[in-house]
């Protein structure tokens, strides 16, 4: 793998850390700004909505720009947003700063995925995308715990200063390591948006939404599940989340290899096993050992889907890969919000924390059904002799 991929991974690490670290600092933020913890929790929602809204806006704004300059500019916006977070005197400006920071999220991962795939031979594209996303998974394993500890020790603002420094390091790496001449987007923006109306592109994005919703319908409430059902102490819950984070990291790299091997068959197989694991998690969650084992496997499967789905979108939208890849990041975050809402709705209607994985399994099953339909459409195209479409069916 070329060294230039390291710059994308470092940037992904910073973006992932700033997205999720706020969850561990909610009490400190709420106390310092004089708001309730639920109000502070809306900073998470604001970021997710910033990603969803920012995806189409920045996709259009950067559609014709050189990719290296675009990535560097997005990282500069990321640094600016985190500095604003660190300096924010009140809740309103902090929320605005979070949204500004979120705007670069979808565009960076979307354009970065296309750049990563272009830096390597075709047979290793998914592994290159997975290497970039490894920064995001490592943010959950290392960045978030370290950022939380720093914020609790020196104040929550110190965490955002630290993330801004990571952003500076990533910006320097992008400028130095990325090739000066990257493939430049061709064609018009309107023509690219027409690609999004194609059946296979739309199916790929809906599958991304459902897979993300499946994960967050359960993961959003994983702390009470592990505490009240499994019986883990708060300190042990932190360890369990670390196990899950290790699974995410391993799954991301596994998904890259599977996607370069056989993309659609691998996607279908991972979804089938994911449904089974979520069903097994229901009884397994009542005891620590089986619960931890299922958490690890669940994490592996959940993030094995990320490079698979990202490459699927790039393949199906071959005439507009940057735009589609960026909007797919918005789709993942839309799934985050939908999953958390569906999980809350299920709990409100009386479903216990133990049975919450059934909701995740149902959403994964819906994704499996659409993936099966998409695969059948590919096979039909192959039967009709479409060479380009046949390549998608691999």
Image (tube, grey):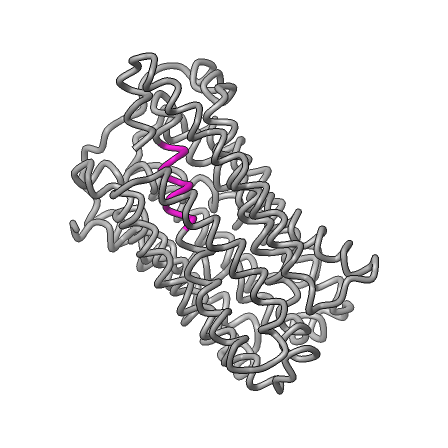
Q: Nearer the viewer, residue 49 or 234?
A: 234
* Image spot of residue 345 (x, y percent): 78, 54
Image: magenta residue range: 305-314
Q: Based on the displayed image, in which of its 4 quarters is residue 24 positioned? A: bottom right
Q: Nearer the viewer, residue 6 or 394?
A: 394
Q: Based on the displayed image, in which of its 4 quarters is residue 137 positioned? A: bottom left
- The total number of labels drawn is 0
Q: Nearer the viewer, residue 329 or 189?
A: 329
* Image spot of residue 368 (x, y percent): 52, 41
Q: Quadrant of the C terminus?
A: top left
Q: In the visual, does 193 lie left or right of 113?
A: right
* Image spot of residue 360 (x, y percent): 61, 54
Q: Is residue 352 placed above or below 260 in the rendered structure?
A: below
Q: Residue furthest right?
A: 349
* Residue at horizontal 48 percent and vertical 37 percent from the top: 328
Q: In the visual, does 181 lie left or right of 135?
A: left
* Residue at horizontal 45 percent and vertical 69 percent from the top: 296
Majority secondary structure of magenta residues: helix
* Residue at horizontal 57 percent and vertical 86 percent from the top: 235
* Image spot of residue 363 (x, y percent): 61, 47
Q: Is residue 198 magenta?
A: no
């Amino acid at each position: 793998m070329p060294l230039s991929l390291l710059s994308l991974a470092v940037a992904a690490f910073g973006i992932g850390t700033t997205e999720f670290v706020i969850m561990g600092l909610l009490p400190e933020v709420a106390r310092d700004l004089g708001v309730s913890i639920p109000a502070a929790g809306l900073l998470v929602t604001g970021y997710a909505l910033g990603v969803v809204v920012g995806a189409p806006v920045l996709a259009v704004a950067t559609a014709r720009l050189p990719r290296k300059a675009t990535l560097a500019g997005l990282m500069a916006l990321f640094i600016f947003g985190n500095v604003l977070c660190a300096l924010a005197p009140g809740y309103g400006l902090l929320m605005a700063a979070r949204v500004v920071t979120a705007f670069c999220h979808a565009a960076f991962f979307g354009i970065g995925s296309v750049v990563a795939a272009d830096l390597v031979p075709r047979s290793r594209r998914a592994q290159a995308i997975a290497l970039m996303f490894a920064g995001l998974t490592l943010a959950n394993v290392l960045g978030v715990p370290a950022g939380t500890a720093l914020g609790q020790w020196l104040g929550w603002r110190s965490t955002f200063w630290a993330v801004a420094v990571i952003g500076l390091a990533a910006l320097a790496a992008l400028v130095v390591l990325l090739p000066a001449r990257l493939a430049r987007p061709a064609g018009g923006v309107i023509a690219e948006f027409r690609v999004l109306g194609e059946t296979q592109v739309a199916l790929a994005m809906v599958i991304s939404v459902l897979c993300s919703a499946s994960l967050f319908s359960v993961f959003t409430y994983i702390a009470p599940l592990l505490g009240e059902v499994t019986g883990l102490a708060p300190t042990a819950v932190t360890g369990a989340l670390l196990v899950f984070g290790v699974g995410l990291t391993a799954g991301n790299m596994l998904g890259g290899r599977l996607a370069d091997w056989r993309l659609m068959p691998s996607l279908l197989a991972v979804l089938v096993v994911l449904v089974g694991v979520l069903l097994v998690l229901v009884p397994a969650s009542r005891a620590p050992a089986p619960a931890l084992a299922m958490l690890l496997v669940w994490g592996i499967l959940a993030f094995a889907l990320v490079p698979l789905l990202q490459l699927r979108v790039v393949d199906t939208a071959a005439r507009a890969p940057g735009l589609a890849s960026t909007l797919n990041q918005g789709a993942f975050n839309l799934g985050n919000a939908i999953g958390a809402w569906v999980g809350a709705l299920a709990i409100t209607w009386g479903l216990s924390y133990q049975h919450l994985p059934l909701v995740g399994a149902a959403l994964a099953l819906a994704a499996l059904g659409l993936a099966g339909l998409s695969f059948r459409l590919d096979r039909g195209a192959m039967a009709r002799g479409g060479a380009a479409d046949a390549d998608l069916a691999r």
